[in-house]
């Protein structure tokens, strides 16, 4: 089987790239290892929070399947300090959203192949992907959108993301308001416990093994790669979304980066401008080293230090005024205050 472009993985990044490519007439083959039931099960317990600005940056994907508007982020620090920030986002029905994208890709001529990619390699003319059943797909371009344990990244790029966080999420029937709640400190090891609205219930979770609600409807675990990889483009091969370690290393949100990277990767393939995709990512605020520095500092902070950092910020209703005044009083925390603000603007 041959194709102009092979996309490995049909999550948000893979479908974004496939939609854009096929809309411009490119021949695309999409490989995904999950059965229909497995696909729905995996994506039903997976990050579904996204900022409204993401949809303003996407050309072919509109805001759809919103099940909860989100107006606030609430950070709960050790010591009893709560910091509330105004945000503009939503929780989407991730499964329904992705199914719609997949249907649109099919209508535009994308060919979907159910199978597990076990090997990716270069050939004289392009690339070859071998599936578990022995079948082979050849193409001019290869796009790795195959998640934390990307075969494309392993075989073509030979790299790993800087951070790998094992997380577990639970769907419960608890009622919550239109707020992303993040509980910091304690046993959450450089991350946090989250509580997000999801339809009539909520999604909650944390680092694997650190939290489990007494009752839940469904649960799922996954590894979240973050902090980036050395290269995301190499002579016709590309990495997008989780395969490229694009989730934010502070919030660990990856939906925005996945959708935008798929679009930009497709644009680079269509224009034939070598290196343009790599340059786009390196020049984008989402890839800023600032987030990694914030993550590294955050991991080392004790509950006492977190409480001390948060206390002056929690005194004022305006997070911006709080941050300015807190920075004047505690200049050593300036990188953390800035990192927090930038994360909520660009990290989801």
Image (cartoon, rainbow, N blue to C red):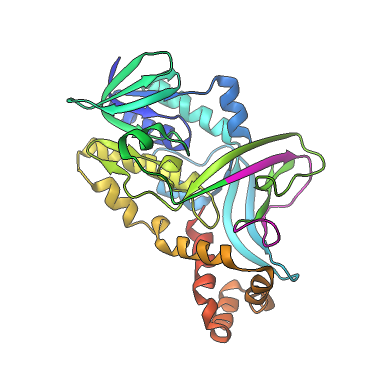
Which quadrant of the structure image shows residue 95? top right
Left or right placement of residue 43 versus residue 142 in this view: right
Q: Is 311 located above or below residue 17 in the figure?
A: below
At 58% from the left edge and 39% from the top edge, which residue is drawn? Answer: 222
Q: How many marks are shown on the rendered structure?
A: 0
Which quadrant of the structure image shows residue 200? top right
At 73% from the left edge and 48% from the top edge, which residue is drawn? Answer: 211
Region rendered in magenta: 166-190
Q: Residue furthest bottom?
A: 329
Q: Nearer the viewer, residue 57 or 312?
A: 312
Left or right placement of residue 14 versus residue 275 in this view: right
Which quadrant of the structure image shows residue 241? top left
Left or right placement of residue 233 versus residue 153 in this view: left
Q: Is residue 199 visible?
A: no
Q: Is residue 169 visible?
A: yes
Instruction: Verify whether residue 24 appears in magenta.
Output: no
Q: Residue furthest left?
A: 124
Q: Is 342 located above or below residue 147 in the figure?
A: below
């Amino acid at each position: 089987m041959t194709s102009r472009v092979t996309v490995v993985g049909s999550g948000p990044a893979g479908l974004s790239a496939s939609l854009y490519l096929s809309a411009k007439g490119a021949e695309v083959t999409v490989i995904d290892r999950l059965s229909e039931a497995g696909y729905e099960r995996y994506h039903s317990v997976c990050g579904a929070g996204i900022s409204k600005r993401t949809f303003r940056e996407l050309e072919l994907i509109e805001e759809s399947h919103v099940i909860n508007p989100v107006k606030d982020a609430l950070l709960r620090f050790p010591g009893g300090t709560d910091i509330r920030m105004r945000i503009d986002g939503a929780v989407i029905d991730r499964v329904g959203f992705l199914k719609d994208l997949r249907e649109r890709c099919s209508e535009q001529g994308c060919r979907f192949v159910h199978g597990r990619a076990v090997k990716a390699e270069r050939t004289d003319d392009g690339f070859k992907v071998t599936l578990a059943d022995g079948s082979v797909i050849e193409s001019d371009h290869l796009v790795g959108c195959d998640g934390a344990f990307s075969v494309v990244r392993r075989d073509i790029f030979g790299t790993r993301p800087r951070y790998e966080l094992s997380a577990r999420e639970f769907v419960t029937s608890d009622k919550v308001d239109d707020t992303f709640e993040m509980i910091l400190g304690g046993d959450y090891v450089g991350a946090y416990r989250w509580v997000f609205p999801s339809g009539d219930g909520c999604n909650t979770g944390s680092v694997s093994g650190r939290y489990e609600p007494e009752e839940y409807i469904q649960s799922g675990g996954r590894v979240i790669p973050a902090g980036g990889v050395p290269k995301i483009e190499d002579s016709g091969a590309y990495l997008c979304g989780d395969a490229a370690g694009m989730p934010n290393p502070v919030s660990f949100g990856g939906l925005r980066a996945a959708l935008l990277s798929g679009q930009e990767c497709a644009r680079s393939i269509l224009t034939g401008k070598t290196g343009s995709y790599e340059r786009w990512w390196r020049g984008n605020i989402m890839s800023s080293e600032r987030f990694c520095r914030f993550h590294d500092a955050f991991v080392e902070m004790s509950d006492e230090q977190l409480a001390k950092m948060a206390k002056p910020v929690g005194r004022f209703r305006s997070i911006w005024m709080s941050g300015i005044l807190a920075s004047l009083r505690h200049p050593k925390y300036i990188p953390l205050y800035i990192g927090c603000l930038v994360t909520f603007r660009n990290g989801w």
